[in-house]
Every structure is written in structure tokens, then in C-alpha cells.
């Protein structure tokens, strides 16, 4: 299945005094690309099948620096694991065809009381649409 892809603008404030992208900005791009996926699929708060998500873990891998002057980045989002109540999304940041950053984020489906719950059928279907071919869905 194909990954979800979006192009996000880079702000001058994403860079620190060293003219390299700040670490927190990488995490913000991860969140922005995940939100773009949810918006694209209509999984906004209040929509049928939409769920709250809590970040359980985030593993970051910086492959190359993002140079000052870059004005936009391409982000891809794909599912690498789908369980009953949790799932893992892989976010990749690219400049042209070069991957400069990867983040694997484990998220837990939750309710308004911050208690875990099973992934809704609609949400699961949207995750399955971006499930990577190298992995199998959890039973």
C-alpha cells in the first residue's frame, strides 16, 4: 500500500543559531504530517470512527542535517504495525529524494478519559490503507 505523502513549509524559526534544524522542529513535523493524514482521511474530532491518540514512544533517527534555506519538506506517513489498541506509524522526511529523518511513533487509541480502547473499524481501515508491504498486520 502506498504511504500518505504531504509537503510542509519550513519556517525560519525551525532553525537554531547553528543554522541547523532544531530537534523539536523535527518532532513538530512528525505531528503535522500525522495531522495532515488524519485531516485528509476525515478523521477529525467528532467524525465517525475518529479516535484520540496518545503517543507511547517515539524513536528518532537523524540521517542528515536539514540545511538552512530549505523552504519545504516532503513527509511520508505509513503504518508498520496495527494491533488491537495500538499502532506504529513511520514518518520519513525527505529533501528531494533523500531521506534526512525517520521517526517511528507508537500510538495508543484512547477515549476522553485517557483510557485505551480498541481501534475503531473505520480508523483501522485508514491505517490499513497505509500499511507497509514489508510487515504483516498483528492478529
Image (tube, grey):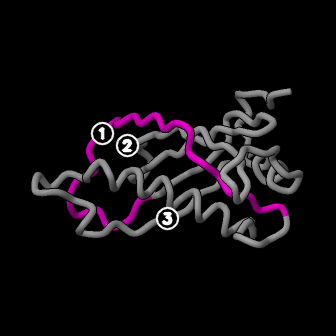
Q: Quick one: label 3, few (<14), some, or many (20+) residues within 10 Å?
A: some
Which residue of the protein is positioned furthest toward the front in this rendering?
A: 113
Q: Quick one: label 2, few (<14), some, or many (20+) residues within 10 Å?
A: some
Q: Position of residue 76 (x, y in %)?
A: 56, 51
Q: On screen, 136 above or below 43?
A: above
Q: Nearer the viewer, residue 69 or 130?
A: 130
Q: Quadrant of the N terminus?
A: top right
Q: CA distance from mark 2 to mark 1?
A: 5 Å
Q: Quick one: label 1, few (<14), some, or many (20+) residues within 10 Å?
A: few
Of the numbered discs 2 and 1, the one sitting upstream in the chain is 1
The residue tagged 3 is: 7
Q: Which contiguous range is marked in magenta?
A: 49-73
The residue tagged 1 is: 64
Which residue of the protein is positioned furthest toward the left in this rendering?
A: 17
Q: Residues at badges 2 and 1 in contact (C-beta under 8 Å)?
A: yes
Was residue 131 drawn as part of the magenta stretch in this picture? no
**Residue at point 77%, 34% (across, down):** 83
Q: CA distance from mark 2 to mark 3?
A: 14 Å
Was residue 68 drawn as part of the magenta stretch in this picture? yes
Q: Residues at badges 3 and 1 in contact (C-beta under 8 Å)?
A: no
Q: Quadrant of the C terminus?
A: top right
Q: Position of residue 21 (x, y in %)?
A: 25, 53
Amino acid at each position: 500500500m502506498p504511504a500518505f505523502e504531504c509537503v510542509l513549509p519550513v519556517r525560519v524559526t525551525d532553525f537554531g543559531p547553528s543554522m541547523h534544524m532544531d530537534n523539536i522542529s523535527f518532532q513538530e513535523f512528525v505531528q503535522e504530517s500525522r495531522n495532515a493524514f488524519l485531516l485528509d482521511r476525515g478523521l477529525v474530532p467528532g467524525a465517525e470512527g475518529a479516535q484520540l491518540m496518545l503517543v507511547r514512544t517515539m524513536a528518532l533517527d537523524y540521517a542528515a542535517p536539514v540545511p538552512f534555506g530549505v523552504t519545504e519538506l516532503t513527509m511520508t506517513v505509513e503504518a508498520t504495525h496495527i494491533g488491537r489498541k495500538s499502532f506504529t506509524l513511520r514518518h520519513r522526511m525527505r529533501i528531494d529524494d533523500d531521506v534526512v529523518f525517520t521517526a517511528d511513533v507508537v500510538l495508543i487509541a484512547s477515549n476522553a478519559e485517557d483510557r485505551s480502547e480498541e481501534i475503531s473499524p473505520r480508523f483501522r481501515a485508514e491505517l490499513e490503507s497505509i500499511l507497509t508491504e514489508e510487515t504483516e498486520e498483528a492478529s
